[in-house]
């Protein structure tokens, strides 16, 4: 099922979420070979960063909690990877984070020169002391960082939002007004905490972490629904998408593409082709095309 | 309530017994019926310290153990644990060895690579050719453990043949020994040479790789090696996969995700 997104033809409406696998060209290529329409690199930061100590990722059965902590070689230390990625045969999102408007701009400008197909700015990560989320909960700061980044890049800009915003539609609108080309929602939910009662301490080394997987899907669907009401630009909807029916649901909320992350754990690296096939089956059973159902849950729209 | 799911949030266990092994090694025993296949690993959490992957080095119906070499902050803490101390485990993760117990096999162990091979050796026939090398005599792990003949070697000649496991493997093949399978674990450069010897003689080989890990179940991407995810697709890779892993014996990712030469990776990992 090929699909158009911001002028690119994708082999499927599935997207690899940032922070899942995306550590090298080889593994991104394998995800593409497994049916993913659009793959996202791990977020690139302004300086080298190891991330948090383990435990960083725990499966809770109904989803996961993680505080990996934005590890990154730093945008200036990825020459090997860029050299590899130059020869890629798949569309790519480069995800970027920073601690200030200036840092976002600096990293995004550099990354843009490496010609990814899209840049995503992560203004929504809950797992670092100072990075990202502060921008994504306030419309003015979201607007400022998007406008600043938009000025210095020459590929389409996707903005990744947090469900913690009091009014995510308002944030999305501010991003659209500042020149964002698409919205990606949602980042992980929370932060939450899991305490081990025998050890009498939080399980994650960072104590708090973002929730993902099936348990957050209703939050993701609601956020995409609110964003679709607020903006005209396309939405990558993600958060707990595990099956084709989940993907159909988030498309009905208003998403153009369905992102997949935690489901790589639950269904394997070929989850992208499985979800696509299940979407195709559902659509053909109902004699529908994906465009017919986008935003279908908004009767008034 | 008995936990039946072991690969999600940690199962908390109390240390049952600690056994001091050869130089710098200790084995920690826990009374727990862990489902397990040789070559798989568990994530071991010392609350307040860190969490690291370890292979199971002893396994019976109601008990298992991990063997730890004191090297970094985590492992130095781990070997000071005493009976009754609490640790968390999750797993087992990974594929484990594809055991062909009806075939003639060689097992090639180097240094702490002996630990993941120990439970495998116990499942293989007594006729298995078992080659075990270490830096020197005091680093030979489990010197008394197995009831099959072992061909020892050390870098300094303090025990067994002076030289490398690959010398012994080559010699056994030259003497006319036939192998249907070679299983190996040890320093990556050693495994790379073992693999190349196997390729030269058309012997299928299974290699257990090591990379820095976080989740243990194939989502975070910390341990990718070429197109393979070591924690999920591995850690054991057969010859077909190995031929395509261009990072085998060349590259690995640091904790930041930066790809570096293997020598730089191991100088960080072995700190």
Image (tube, coloured by chain):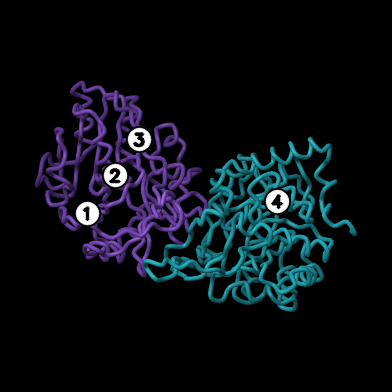
Q: Which of marks 3 and 2 is nearer the N terminus?
A: 2
Nearer the observer, B88 or A178: B88
Colour of the chain lettered A:
cyan
- Return the x and y of residue B78 as percentages of the image width and height: 27, 62
User: Which mark's residue is nearer the viewer, 1 or 3?
Assistant: 1
| Helix, strand or loop for disc 1 | strand
| Rendering coords of residue B69 (x, y %) | 24, 56
Q: Do the residues labelled 2 and 1 touch (CB within 8 Å)?
A: no
Which of discs 4 and 3 lies nearer the camera? The answer is 4
In three-dimensional space, the C-alpha distance between marks 2 and 1, rounded to whole angstroms, equals 13 Å
The chain letter under disc 2 is B
Q: In terms of sequence position, does the residue under pointer 2 or pointer 1 come before the other? A: 1
Q: Distance between the residues labelled 4 and 3?
A: 38 Å
Q: On residue A258, which mark appears?
A: 4
Label 1 to label 3, Cα distance in Å? 25 Å
**In the structure shown, which secondary structural element does the residue marked by tag 3 occupy?**
strand
Looking at the image, tell me whether mark 1 or mark 3 is earlier in sequence order: 1
Q: Do labels 4 and 2 share a chain?
A: no
Residue at left 31%, top 24%?
B180
For disc 1, the marked residue is B27
**Which label number is shown at residue B206?**
3
Q: Residue B116 carries which label?
A: 2
Residue drawn at point x = 46 percent, y = 42 percent: B233
Give the quadrant of the N terminus of chain B: bottom left
Quarter location, residue A10: top right
Frontmost of labels 2 and 1 is 1
Q: Can you tell which mark lies on residue B165?
A: none
Q: The purple chain is which one?
A: B
């Amino acid at each position: 099922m090929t699909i158009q997104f911001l002028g690119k033809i994708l082999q499927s409406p599935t997207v690899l979420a940032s922070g899942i696998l995306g550590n090298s060209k080889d593994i991104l290529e394998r995800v593409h070979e497994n049916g993913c329409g659009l793959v996202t690199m791990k977020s690139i930061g302004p300086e080298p960063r190891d991330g948090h100590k383990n435990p960083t990722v725990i499966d809770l059965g109904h989803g996961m909690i993680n505080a990996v902590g934005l590890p990154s070689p730093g945008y200036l230390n990825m020459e090997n990877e860029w050299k590899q990625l130059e020869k890629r045969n798949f569309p790519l999102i480069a995800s970027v984070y920073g601690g200030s408007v200036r840092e976002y701009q600096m990293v995004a400008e550099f990354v843009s020169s490496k010609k990814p197909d899209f840049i995503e700015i992560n203004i929504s990560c809950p797992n670092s002391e100072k990075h990202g989320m502060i921008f994504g909960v306030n419309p003015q700061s979201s607007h400022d960082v998007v406008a600043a980044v938009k000025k210095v890049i020459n590929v389409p800009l996707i903005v990744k939002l947090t469900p913690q915003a009091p009014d995510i539609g308002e944030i999305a609108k501010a991003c659209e007004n500042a020149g964002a080309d698409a919205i990606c929602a949602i980042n992980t939910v929370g932060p939450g905490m899991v305490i081990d009662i025998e050890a009498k301490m939080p399980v994650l080394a960072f104590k708090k972490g973002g929730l993902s997987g099936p348990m957050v899907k209703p939050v993701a669907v609601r956020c995409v629904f609110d964003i679709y009401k607020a903006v005209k630009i396309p939405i990558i909807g993600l958060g707990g998408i595990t099956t084709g029916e989940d993907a159909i649901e988030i498309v009905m909320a208003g998403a153009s593409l369905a992102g997949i992350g935690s489901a790589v754990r639950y269904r394997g690296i070929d989850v992208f082709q499985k979800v696509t096939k299940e979407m195709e089956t559902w659509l053909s059973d109902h004699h529908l095309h994906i465009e017919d159902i986008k935003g279908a849950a908004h009767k008034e729209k | 309530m008995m936990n039946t799911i072991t690969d999600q949030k940690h199962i908390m266990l109390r240390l049952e017994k600690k056994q001091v092994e050869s130089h710098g090694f200790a084995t920690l025993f826990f009374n727990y019926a862990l489902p397990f296949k040789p070559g798989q690993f568990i994530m071991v959490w010392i609350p307040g310290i860190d969490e690291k992957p370890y292979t199971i080095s002893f396994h019976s119906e109601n008990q298992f153990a991990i063997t730890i070499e004191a090297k970094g902050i985590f492992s130095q803490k781990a070997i000071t644990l005493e009976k009754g101390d609490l640790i968390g485990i999750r797993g087992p993760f990974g594929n484990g060895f594809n055991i062909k117990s009806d075939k003639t096999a060689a097992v090639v162990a180097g240094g702490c690579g002996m630990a993941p091979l120990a439970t495998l050796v116990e499942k293989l026939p007594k006729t298995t050719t078992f080659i075990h090398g270490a830096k020197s005599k005091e680093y030979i792990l489990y010197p008394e453990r197995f009831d099959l003949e072992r061909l020892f070697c050390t870098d300094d000649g303090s025990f067994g043949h002076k030289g490398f496991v690959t010398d012994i493997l080559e010699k056994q093949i030259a003497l006319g020994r036939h192998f249907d399978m070679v299983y190996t674990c040890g320093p990556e450069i050693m495994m790379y040479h073992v693999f190349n010897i196997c390729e030269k003689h058309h012997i299928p080989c299974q290699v257990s790789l090591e990379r820095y890990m976080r989740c243990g179940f194939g989502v975070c991407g910390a341990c990718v090696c070429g197109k393979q995810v070591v924690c999920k697709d591995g850690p054991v890779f057969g010859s077909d996969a190995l031929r395509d892993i261009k990072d085998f014996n060349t590259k690995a990712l640091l904790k930041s995700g930066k790809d570096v030469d293997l020598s730089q990776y191991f100088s960080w990992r072995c700190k």
